[in-house]
Image: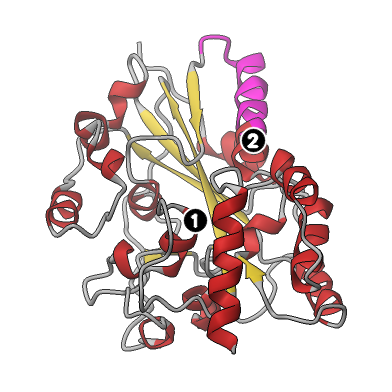
Amino acid sequence: MNKHIDFSIIKSLALEAGFQDCAAIKAKEYDISFLSNWLNKGYNAEMQYLGNNLDKRENPSLLLENGKSIISFIVSYNTQEFADLQLNNTKNRNNNLKFAAYSYFDDYHKAIKQALYGIIACIQERYPDFKAVAFVDSSPFSEKMIAHEADLGFIGKNSLLIHKEYGSQILLGEIITNYSTDYNKNLIEDLCLDCSLCIEACPNGAINNDKTINANLCSGYQNMIKKGEIEEGIRLEGYIYGCDICLNACPFNSKPKIANSKILGLNTNMQELNLAINNNEIDKSIFNKAKKKGAIENIKFQKLLSNIEKAKQESN
C-alpha cells in the first residue's frame, strides 16, 4: 500500500515552524558527475571527505529504509533585526573585522534540525507510520542540488542556491521519509542571466565559469576549514571567519527579507566577541562563550588569532 501525505500539510507545518519555504522531490538516483569532475580538478582542497559515501550521494534513498521522498526546507538569515544590529555595532568599533553573517546567529545545525524534528513529530501524530530522518549540513547528498530539483531556487554563478524571493542568504535542511507526497515537476529558470557581479566581487578569483568554486582560492575555506595558516596571496577583505562578499554582491540579497527569524536566534555572545576583536580586547573566555552555542564550532582560537593578524596586515 502506498503511503502518501498531501504536501499542503507539510508546507503548512513548515511555515508555522518558521521556515520560509519548502518543496519535495522523489528520492531516486541522481547524476553526480559534476561532483566527480570537481573533485578530480582538486577544487575541494583539503576537504577529502567530500569524496566519501558516493553511493549515498548518488542515491539518497539509501539513508532511510524505504525512503520515498526528500523534502527540502529553507531558512532566511537576511533579517532586519540583524541589519539593525550590525549598523549599531559599526558605530562602536575601531576596526572592520567581520564574521560571515550566518555565524552571528545561534548554531543553525541544532536550531534547524530541532525545527525539522518538530515537524516530523506533528506529522506522526496524524500518521503514526510516518518514518523520517532530518539532515542539516550532515547529509552525503548535495543539499543545493536537491533544493534546486525541488524548485526552491536556481544555482547562481557562485554555486549557491538562490531563491526568487529570499535570495541566497539562506540555510537548508532536509527530511527523507518513507511517504510519497506531491512533487515538483518543473525546474525554476536561471535568473542570473548575464549578471556576473559575484564573480567580479570575489577578491581571489575563486568563482569558476561553470557555477563551481575553487576552494583553494576561497577566503571562506581558507579562514574556516584549512588547517594552518592562510595561503600567500589570499585576500580576506576584513573577514576573519567565512565570507559574504559574493553574497552581498548578489542583487537578490539587496535588502533584508524578513523582520526576524523564528528558528534562528541572534547569538549575543557573538556580538560581544566581534566587538572585543574590533576593539583589540579579545581573550579566549569571550571566544569560548561565543563558540559554545554558536556556528563557529569548527575553528580553534589560535586559527582565529592568525586570521585576525592576516586581516589587519591587509588593511595596513
Between circles 1 and 2, the one closer to the viewer is 1
Q: Is residue 312 left or right of residue 147?
A: right
Q: Is residue 200 left or right of residue 98?
A: left
| Secondary structure of the residue carrying numbered label 2 | helix
Is 120 included in the stretch rendered in magenta?
Answer: yes
Dot 2, crowdedness within 10 Å: few (<14), some or many (≥20)? some
Residue beneath label 2, please?
A: 110
- x and y percent of residue 43 in the render? 23, 60
Tell me the kind of residue under disc 2: Lys
- Of 126 and 192, which appears nearest the observer? 192
Numbered disc 1: secondary structure: helix
User: Could you tell me which residue is drawn at 63 percent across and 54 percent down?
Assistant: 20
Instruction: Say which mark, if any, is on residue 224.
Output: 1
- Residue 217, how many percent across, how many down? 33, 70
Q: Position of residue 122 (x, y in %)?
A: 67, 23
Residue 142 vertical position relative to residue 217 in the rendered view, above or below: above
Main SS class of the magenta portion in the image: helix
Q: Earlier in the sequence, mark 1 or mark 2?
A: 2
Q: Nearer the viewer, residue 227 or 244?
A: 227
Q: Which residues are magenta?
A: 114-129
**In the rendered image, the vertical position of residue 315 relative to residue 233, given as above or below:** below
